[in-house]
Amino acid sequence: MKVSKKWLEQYAPIPMDLAAYQHEMIMRGTSVEGIEDMASQVQNVIVGRILSVTPHGDSDHLLICQVDVGKKTLQIVTGATNVSAGDLVPVAVDGAELPGGKQIREGKLRGVVSQGMLCSGPELGVPVDLYPSVGEEGILLFAEDYPLGADVRPILGIDDQVIDFEILANRPDCQCVWGVARETAAAMGAEFRKPHITVDTVPGKIEDFVRIRVEDDTLCPRYVGRVVTNVRIAPSPLWMRAALHAAGVRSINNVVDITNYVMLETGHPMHAFDLSQVRDGAIVVRRARPGETLRTLDGKDRALTPEMLVIADNDRATGVAGVMGGEESEIAEGTRTLLFECAAFDRTSVRVTSRVLGLRTESSSRFEKGVSPATAREAMDRACQLIRLLDAGDVIEGVYDNYPKPIELPWIAASVRRISRRAGVDIPGEEMMRILKALHFDVKLKGDDLHAKAPAFRQDVEMEADLCEEVLRFHGYEHLQPTTLRGQSTGGGKSPRIHARDKIKRVLTAMGYYEAISFSFVSPKIIEKLRLAGDDPRLNQLKLLNPLGEDTGVMRASLAPSMLGMLALNFSRGNDRAALFEVAPVFDTSARKPGELPNENWTLCVGGYGAAMDFYQLRDVLTELLRQFGVACRIVVGGQPYHHPGRSATLMAGDLPIATLGEVHPEVCDAFELPRRPLLAELNVELLFALERAVDKVAPLPRFPAVTRDLALVMDEQTPVGQVVEAIAEAGTSLLERVEVFDVYRGAQVGEGKKSVAFSLVFRHAERTLGDGDIGPVFEGIVRVCEERFGAMMRG
Amino acid sequence: MNIQENIDHLLEHLQADLCEVVDSQTLEALRLRVLGRKGEITTLMRVLGQVPPEERPAIGQLINDAREKAAGWLDTLAMRIAVHERTEALARETIDVTQPMWERRLGNLHPINLALDEILDVFTGMGFEAVEGPEVELDLYNFELLNLPKNHPSRDAQDTFYIEENIVLRTHTSPVQARTMLERKPPIRIVCPGRVYRADEFDATHSPVFHQLEGLMIDEDVTMGDLKGTLDAFAKRLYDPDIATRFRPSFFPFTEPSAEVDLTCVSCRGQGCRVCKGTGWIEVLGAGMVNPKVLELCGIDSQKYSGFAFGMGLDRIALLRYGVQDLRLMFEGDMRFLRQFR
């Protein structure tokens, strides 16, 4: 919220420089986002009178002006066409500065000396509504006489600073000049100088002009109306235009400006009706009727519902209460009699209405945040006072004020000791009382008992904790003393799940993979690139009602698309290899009923491409990970639909698939624009956690030596070596400690379609040293099994 | 020639020959020639039989002395040659240690999780337990129990993604706090790390997906000073003892009083720089005393217990810590970015 410093200082002093003020306000809870010094942006621009205008010999569009700036006469070349001798204009002299850091220097234009520049309104940061002149294009012409050489800034209303406040959501009462002035005064230890409000009136009853009827005082707890006759529409005075300009509001005319000025000053949105355009002189505040429609000020027809509050005449709605007025009764040049409305509307109702209609206005956003009914009459009278001050009309004595249930804020019973305990700072009761009184609370203090009642404009103070905050922020958060935690100690530490996930990450990083994080929502279409079967549950995706865009429309049911996307990004950027993993939940909504949460199944996804990466490397990573969790697994041929059918596998923990891995299917590679043979694996982390087995007992180290025998078997190319190993392990009895493959040979010596696999068999007995006689039969048994089951022959 | 002369000649000859020896093989040959079973000294010993018995001890002594002298010379030289030959052998085995071969590197954690790990270390050390909850969450836990009723304007600031009317993508990790309060009895000390969502456009400083860590402590007589003490200790442990905290009044629906907590700018140590926009402070945390309404809504007696809560954005902490200029890098998985961390 932008506020003119001059305006603010009418009500509260700022006896320090603005940087110090900014810091002080931040520490008291009213954040100052920035300070814009309008005055310093315009320097050395003075009033000058044009003495003569002559053509430039060398240019069709340039003119040479002689300009009297008081102490001397300057020659200035200009391209403007709207100046003539006698005009009073702003002159930027040598060394002048204009908004945007523009510097003016004496120089030559097409060979002619120019000692400055004649300025337009926009060049000085002065829009036409702040200083009405010739429009945006030409040089600004002063309407009145000013001393030659005078500083133009006070004349144009830009000799001010603009303070930009950021108001917290619980303090709608601070969304106005009076609000920040109250906080400023309390922070500066000064009095809030509230204006004395009186209204000069002419006799008259309001009922003679308008009949106002509030039908729903729940949604409209207060409605104040006053009538102004003999309205004289005219421009506002400069001080008002300047104050509005600083706040970023355009000046329209005196009446509209007053409604805006009062809104900015008091926080109360106001509305002005041209009474001649109000049919039957009736204003009804009621809920909209079913099927009712309304054309709003922006020219759109809006469908209304009975949840919405409208301003209506006897027949139909003319405006949406607190959101937007009607077109017909707008203030215009010819308005002679007007009605000011200053009302309070229910914040939830305004919020919902504005949402449903898609209409957000300054008024609606203020009502949503909360406007106190208690101060509506004061704001109305301030507006009428300004009408008189600007001589814009005559205010009728009679007032309509429907306020059936005046807000009575409760006394809050609090304890000085408890407030101090909560804060952790000892604050004497008298100090609390002083602070609360400076914030306009009513306070009673008796020993430890503190009773406080918030001022009517505060709707956020309900309980002792709120008083604690008020007291603490003015006592000073800087006085908080750090203390160490006391009381019963707690165990602390990471939850078992976080621990287990850390372990997964430790294994993966040790294997050379880098952790990545990708968005949890993806395009609903991306899953279609995975070649999943039509009944795959992963096609059931959890949709967002209001996604940022189509690309982020569903919560992912698989990490694979995200991983493939990241691999593709690496590839497209010329990275010759990638080795990534991500651990994150996937969202399973297949069994979800409305109102229920989806299952969030944590999953590990590993992906990579490039040198030194192949199926076996990835398989070893996964089997090592399982081994680290004490989970035994079996390798089964074939993985996911997005895998290469001949180069993929599923790891089975008992009967349960725990991981799938393999090369990515070429079609999927094409769909994601991936290089050849990227690898991808997914592992069910939930199952891994469920099956995790700790090391419960370490085996004693062997006391007798092992005996190693090598075995080379020639078998068909198609024979799965993994199954042969399993068969050997089984046939090896308890004597076979270990079996490893150390060579696979293919070539002429073993024949077409065959391979020779060399196994190293390690035998050991726990109680004695083994001899040939022990091993021989077992070894023969192994060879026999391999021959019978796989047709494998010992290599000669 | 008498024996004495023989000995002298033998030793002289040996000395000359030793000078010629260059490797252990020739040396061994020489040792054999002189000291071997059929060597020169042994031959002399055999001659001893022909010497008159009364001269034998003296001459035997002469021969023995010569043997020891020769053996000494041979041993000394053998040692020198062994050292020399070892050195030569090592020199022959020299490899080019600068020649690049294959690279074998550990991977590493994502920078956000590196930062999280350090932060968790600090808080778990103070007795806080790290707990988690679902990312798709009921409105009840994400909002209502935290004093954010429906149609409350404070919800606007949260820019919520909805799944259904009452199901949202959690906008903070606070629902984990609500769930914990409902499940447990005080004393409670927890921190809740996790992924959260807000409908922000994705650019250099904003992301619709980001990470938070929130903390909650509830016990009898917990004060705002305890909050200050906890966050002070956190800042000093995470960075160093020169880092201070600054509390500024603020507003959150779930806390009362509330504070924005700034840390001394880690980049300029409080001098004022581009990172802190000249203020010397960086805004890192939101915190406050748990609103008694929240305690009551979550089934905790607000007369008996009080508590504090705080929250921080992990993405921002990681950005600041590693000087990352663009938040989008965090979510791309570009190896060139990820390989820079350790």
Image (cartoon, helix red, strand yellow):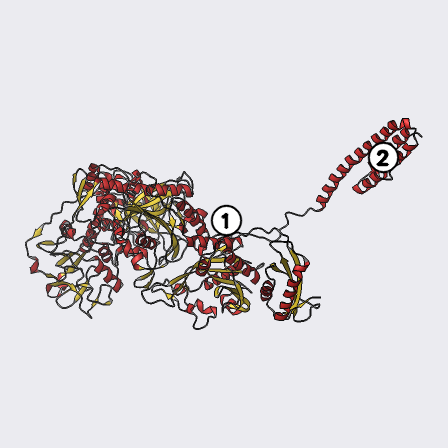
Helix, strand or loop at label 1? It is loop
Residue A86 appears anywhere in the view: no
The correct choice, above or below, for A534 with respect to A771 in the image is below
Chain ID at mark 1: B
Image x and y of residue A572, in percent = 51, 61
Q: Nearer the viewer, residue A293 or B137?
A: B137
Image x and y of residue A30, in percent = 27, 45
Which residue was labeled with disc 2?
A: B14
Q: Residue at x 45, y 55 (%)?
A: A501
Query: Which of the two labelled residues, at mark 1 and mark 2, occupies the earlier sequence position?
Result: 2
Residue type, numbered disc 1: Arg
Check disc 2: other Cα within 10 Å, few if <14, some if 14-19, many if 20+. Answer: some
The correct choice, above or below, for B80 with respect to B127 in the image is above
Residue A272, numbered circle: none
Which residue was labeled with disc 1?
A: B342
Chain ID at mark 2: B
**Quadrant holding the C terminus of chain A:** bottom right
